[in-house]
């Protein structure tokens, strides 16, 4: 976010991960560029869960992968406990990645089908020359019986069980930050609740800091301390979870909340708060990127990009015409 893009970063000692003006772009052929992430900034305090939410294609997963430098961002800063990750390479970067682990959306395809669970979970310690005798411990921690699970292969497990294996694979390296990239979107609703509860328990047990990414605000609001709303590569709004849900200021945030069954707010139907399909990230709209779908859009929205600004104690917003009742 040009100009004041980093204004909502907190100057607190307990900040573990700090991201400033992150830019992720990909070639799209014929000289075109996908602008997946455009100047995103946020920070993450130790022990906090930051939810990142938005529609498919908003750039949230691209931002997540840029945090672990897979691939590195085109521009911007990613600092883990004061260490600038974008400046690292080779062995220094490889060692730092131990502290940042990811859990992916599709648990089955993220596991090697030819290996047994003990090999899959124990691979990290082997790569980093660490003791590998914690496999049984982490399998028990994620709710799997080591005696039976460790000798089986991924295809013998359900999707929820495979996600537990993926979590165990991340935990065994003692990470400080775990990035959960749509970790429950491929699971049944009842299994989703189990995995979300497990992540909460593990966060406390292993003193984890979490980035939790999802397209479903109903899921994110139950596990996050703060929520960052993204649209087409930009930050729309950032606030503590309870405040964002009870006092949404950005029209896009209000549309997301209106789509939650029993969301608790007296909002118009979601289809009156948002219209049409998202524009292409290859050619995003001028000014505010949400303006082509926003019922509040005016001429200024096409001419001037809204800058992030503070509208509450820890509530940040990028909108020219927010909901008057919430500001």
Image (spheres, rainbow, N blue to C red):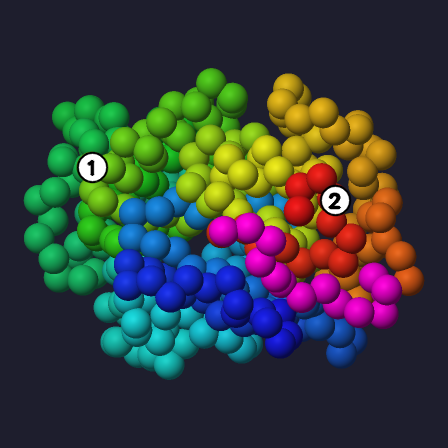
Numbered badge on residue 178 = none
Residue 153 appears anywhere in the view: no
- Give the left or right position of residue 195, taking residue 184 as reference: left
Identify the residue under disc 2: 324
Residue 71 within the magenta-colored segment of the rendering: no
Residue 45 in picture, x, y percent from top left: 34, 54
Name the residue located 43 percent from the left edge and 35 percent from the top edge. 223
Which residue is more in the foreground, 110 or 195?
195
Taking the image as shown, residue 6 lies to the left or right of residue 59, namely: left
Using the rendered view, name the quadrant where residue 258 is placed: top right
Crowding at mark 1 (Cα within 10 Å: few <14, some 14-19, many 20+): few
- Image coordinates of residue 286 in percent, x first then y, are 82, 68
Task: Give the magenta part as a residue range.
Answer: 300-313
Camera-nearest residue between 300 and 49: 300
Residue of label 1: 205
Q: Secondary structure under badge 2?
A: helix
Residue in front for this viewpoint, 49 or 251: 251
* In the rendered image, the vertical position of residue 260 relative to residue 93, given as above or below: above
Please say whether residue 201 is visible from this viewpoint: yes
| Picture quarter with the N terminus | bottom right
Please give the name of the residue rendered at 26% of the width and 76% of the height, measured from the top-left corner: 92
Residue 27 in the image: state x and y as whole percent. Answer: 67, 72
**Mark sitting earlier along the chain (1/2):** 1
Q: Is residue 305 a member of the stretch shown in magenta?
A: yes
Quick check: 153 above or below 43? above
């Amino acid at each position: 976010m040009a100009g004041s893009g980093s204004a909502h970063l907190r100057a607190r000692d307990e900040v573990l991960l700090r991201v400033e003006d992150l830019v992720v772009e990909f070639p799209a052929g014929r000289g075109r560029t996908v602008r997946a992430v455009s100047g995103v900034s946020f920070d993450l305090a130790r022990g906090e869960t930051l939810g990142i939410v938005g529609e498919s294609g908003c750039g949230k997963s691209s931002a997540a992968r840029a945090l672990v430098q897979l691939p590195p961002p085109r521009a911007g800063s990613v600092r883990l406990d004061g260490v600038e990750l974008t400046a690292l390479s080779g062995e220094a970067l490889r060692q730092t990645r131990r502290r940042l682990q990811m859990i992916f959306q599709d648990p089955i395809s993220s596991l090697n089908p030819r290996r047994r669970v003990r090999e899959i979970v124990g691979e990290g310690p082997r790569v980093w020359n660490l003791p590998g005798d914690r496999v049984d411990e982490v399998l028990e921690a994620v709710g799997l019986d080591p005696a039976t699970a460790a000798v089986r292969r991924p295809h013998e497990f359900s999707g929820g069980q495979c996600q537990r294996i993926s979590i165990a694979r991340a935990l065994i390296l003692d990470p400080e930050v775990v990035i959960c990239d749509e970790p429950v979107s491929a699971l049944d609703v009842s299994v989703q609740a189990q995995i979300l509860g497990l992540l909460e328990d593990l966060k406390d047990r292993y003193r984890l800091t979490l980035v939790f990414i999802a397209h479903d605000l109903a899921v994110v609001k139950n596990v996050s301390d703060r929520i960052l709303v993204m649209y087409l590569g930009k930050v729309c709004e950032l606030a503590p979870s309870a405040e964002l849900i009870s006092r949404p200021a950005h029209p896009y945030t209000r549309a997301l909340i209106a789509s939650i069954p029993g969301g608790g707010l007296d909002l118009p139907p979601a289809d009156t708060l948002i219209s049409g399909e998202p524009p292409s990230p290859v050619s995003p709209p001028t000014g505010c990127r949400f303006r082509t779908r926003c019922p509040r859009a005016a001429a200024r929205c096409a001419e001037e990009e809204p800058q992030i600004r503070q509208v509450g104690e820890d509530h940040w917003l990028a909108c020219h015409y927010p909901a008057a009742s919430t500001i």
